[in-house]
């Protein structure tokens, strides 16, 4: 109770301080990163604005570049990513007979990119742009929409007079989506830019199961009548290439955090968290409570904490079929011709074919690129016919100390920064 | 059942506003019969801007995709007289096979990477064109490197297959899948992916060094025709069976 009364009084001071430091008037407008038709700039209902450039690459499909965010409470625009895009999609069948590389052997752009139609972009804005084909065509290929994301926060509070109040707010995502048809599969490339600064990258798969890949019962699942047609189990093992540039400073570093048991306290186990700097190129694997972040060495929030984004991977099936598909995340120094996690085919760097090649020389990370692998081992089910319900795989990039508080903090909570005193 | 739910839905709205009821009911008639969304949520539905696309600019700025003009200029510049003279395309004619073009991912200057395949030397060729000067700023080639197939390569592969005795297998697969006789390639929709030989592939072991394709074939009504065992070697102009 005591804390809250003091907090309520402090709010006015904190707000005054914010008004002095956070005004956009002195924010220098950056040079245009792209023309209007390839820019997306949208403000979500809670006042968060995302701005970015988009285009289609023949192989990678949708590429987002210069992804920046600003908030009602933090109006100075913060650049987060130089670029994000898919970097491979391995589709091996459990029979061992077939493996498709849908990004490097087909591609998600050009003729494989679908023109949006019908419900593809219902409620959103279907944007026209070049499809990235060898002879490019301008078509409706990017869906931009704003979608509710559920409850953003909820908390009880009491004002100076002791009156109870509930703070709660519906959150929203700015959603960017394109669709590519490769064979019988139709893939959705999706980026969700949340109003709290989080970025979610997802790949969805629909269309139909392979018409030709039917196997025995240990490698498939019966999907027709009785136990006759065993549709082959298979992987969708995807890579994304993420190039951070936090606050546009080009001073990003990589850190790994591990939390391990450390004896017992009076009540329960003690845990201890340690940081490992990842200064050189390399591949890394998940472990219980392990996480990575890309942190600016120079850009700090108003609490004096270095701004960073943390990698959060959820459901994932690791595909051990190749050395390059085995690690969970690989960090490499940025090089223009290191474009795809495998099947990289650039005569300018002919020996660099996979992320294993990229990382082999353990170069110092001055401009780190993060290669995130997320796999989905698909065991077909009766419901996959037909069309197949979308199944999703992906990861989140969560802001860690990008702002000094929750960017959606309501006015009454602006003083709640640090231990209540 | 479905009709009654729609009716109930429309009535509920009508008590609030007859005008809204008309709009929502007609929307509902077009939409899949989802569980009725709450009207409050519909009213709060966030909006994004919906800009009209203007005419395409002659040249892009920054991270813009390559414009039609830029693609034309870059392709012309990339096809240097020397490259045109020394290489051959998928049909065997002089000049390299044009594969793809993309904006170079890094650097401030707008640069296009133009990719060709030279069937004479079986090399992938990358020509880097500075879009400001219109000049080739870098030229690279390497063997054993394959990018996705161009439309003309896919059609050439289909032609090679149709002219080969193994076309009988495609025709048989077509008959089996559709119950009809394949009249000719016009009855097919074809995409393809690059095929690289795996250790056990004896009949196609040159694929990877050679440019080879596997076809994904559909009849005009969308039925997939299994042609997965047939590999077309565009460099050697041969067709082989995997198993």
Image (spheres, rainbow, N blue to C red):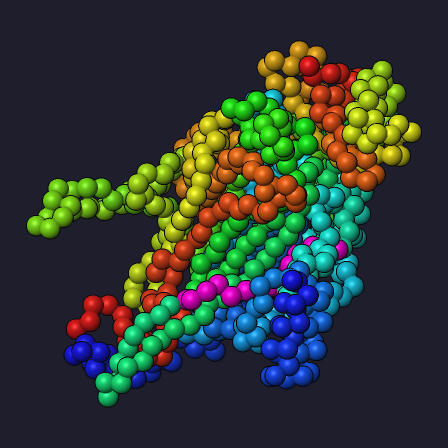
Q: Is residue A64 above or below residue A388?
A: below
Q: Nearer the viewer, residue A329 or B137?
A: A329
Q: Nearer the viewer, residue B105 or B188?
A: B188
Furthest toward the right, the residue is: B183
Q: Is residue A269 above or below residue A17?
A: above
Q: Position of residue A252 (x, y in %)?
A: 40, 50
The residue drawn where x is 30% and y is 60% is A305
The span picked out in magenta is A139-152
| Image side of residue B234 versus residue B51, left or right | right
Tell me if I can see residue A212 in this picture.
yes
Q: Nearer the viewer, residue A140 or A378?
A: A378
Tell me if I can see residue B63 in this picture.
no
Q: Position of residue B171 (x, y in %)?
A: 84, 24
Quadrant of residue A361 in the image? top left
User: Which quadrant: the N terminus of chain A?
Assistant: bottom left
Within the magenta stretch, is there residue B26? no
The residue drawn where x is 34% and y is 45% is A291
């Amino acid at each position: 109770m005591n804390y809250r009364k003091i907090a309520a009084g402090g709010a006015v001071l904190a707000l005054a301080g914010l008004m002095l430091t956070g005004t956009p008037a002195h924010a220098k407008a950056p040079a245009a990163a792209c023309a209007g038709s390839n820019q997306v700039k949208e403000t979500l209902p809670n006042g968060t604005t995302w701005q970015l450039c988009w285009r289609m690459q023949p192989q990678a499909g949708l590429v987002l570049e210069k992804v920046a965010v600003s908030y009602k409470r933090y109006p100075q625009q913060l650049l987060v990513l130089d670029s994000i895009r898919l970097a491979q999609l391995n589709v091996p069948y459990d029979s061992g007979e077939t493996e498709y590389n849908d990004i490097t052997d087909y591609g998600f752009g050009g003729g494989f990119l679908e023109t949006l139609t019908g419900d593809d972009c219902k409620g959103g804005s279907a944007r026209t742009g070049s499809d990235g084909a060898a002879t490019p065509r301008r078509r409706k290929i990017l869906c931009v929409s704003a979608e509710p994301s559920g409850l953003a926060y909820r908390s009880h509070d009491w004002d100076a007079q002791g009156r109870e109040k509930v703070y709660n707010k519906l959150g929203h995502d700015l959603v960017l989506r394109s669709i590519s048809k490769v064979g019988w599969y139709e893939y959705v490339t999706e980026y969700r830019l949340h109003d709290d600064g989080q970025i979610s990258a997802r790949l969805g798969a629909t269309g139909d199961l392979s018409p030709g890949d039917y196997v025995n019962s240990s490698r498939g699942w019966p999907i027709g009548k009785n136990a006759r047609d065993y549709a082959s189990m298979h992987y969708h093992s995807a890579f994304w290439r993420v190039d951070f540039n936090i606050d546009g400073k080009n001073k990003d570093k990589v850190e790994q955090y591990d939390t391990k048991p450390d004896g017992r306290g009076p009540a329960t186990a003690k845990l201890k968290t340690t940081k490992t700097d990842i200064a050189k190129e390399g591949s890394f694997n998940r472990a219980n409570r392990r996480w990575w972040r890309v942190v600016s060495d120079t850009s700090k929030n108003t609490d004096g904490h270095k701004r960073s984004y943390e990698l959060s991977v959820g459901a994932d099936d690791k595909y051990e079929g190749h050395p390059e598909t085995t690690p969970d995340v690989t960090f490499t120094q940025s090089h223009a011709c290191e474009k795809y996690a495998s099947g990289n085919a650039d005569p300018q760097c002919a020996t660099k074919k996979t992320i294993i090649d990229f990382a082999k020389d353990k170069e110092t990370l001055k401009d780190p690129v993060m290669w995130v692998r997320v796999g989905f081992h698909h065991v077909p089910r009766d419901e996959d016919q037909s069309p197949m319900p979308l199944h999703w795989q992906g990861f989140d990039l969560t802001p860690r100390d990008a702002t000094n508080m929750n960017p959606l903090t309501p006015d009454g909570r602006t003083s709640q920064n640090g231990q209540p005193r | 059942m479905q009709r009654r739910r729609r009716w109930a839905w429309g009535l509920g709205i009508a008590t609030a506003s007859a005008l809204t009821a008309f709009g929502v009911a007609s929307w509902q008639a077009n939409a899949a019969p989802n569980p009725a969304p709450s009207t409050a949520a519909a009213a709060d539905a966030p909006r994004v801007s919906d800009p009209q696309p203007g005419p395409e600019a002659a040249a892009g700025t920054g991270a813009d995709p390559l414009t039609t003009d830029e693609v034309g200029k870059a392709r012309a510049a990339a096809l240097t007289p020397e490259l045109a003279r020394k290489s051959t395309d998928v049909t065997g004619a002089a000049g390299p096979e044009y594969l793809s073009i993309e904006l170079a991912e890094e650097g401030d200057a707008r640069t296009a990477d133009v990719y060709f395949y030279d069937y004479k030397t079986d090399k992938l060729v990358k020509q880097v064109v500075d879009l400001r000067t219109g000049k080739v700023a870098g030229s690279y080639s390497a063997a054993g490197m394959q990018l996705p197939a161009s439309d003309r390569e896919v059609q050439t592969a289909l032609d090679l297959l149709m002219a080969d005795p193994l076309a009988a297998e495609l025709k048989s697969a077509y008959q089996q899948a559709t119950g009809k006789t394949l009249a000719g390639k016009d009855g097919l929709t074809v995409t393809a992916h690059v095929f690289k030989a795996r250790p056990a592939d004896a009949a196609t072991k040159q694929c990877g060094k050679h440019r080879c394709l596997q076809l994904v074939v559909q009849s005009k009504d969308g039925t997939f025709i299994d042609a997965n065992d047939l590999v077309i070697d565009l460099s050697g102009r041969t067709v082989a069976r995997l198993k």
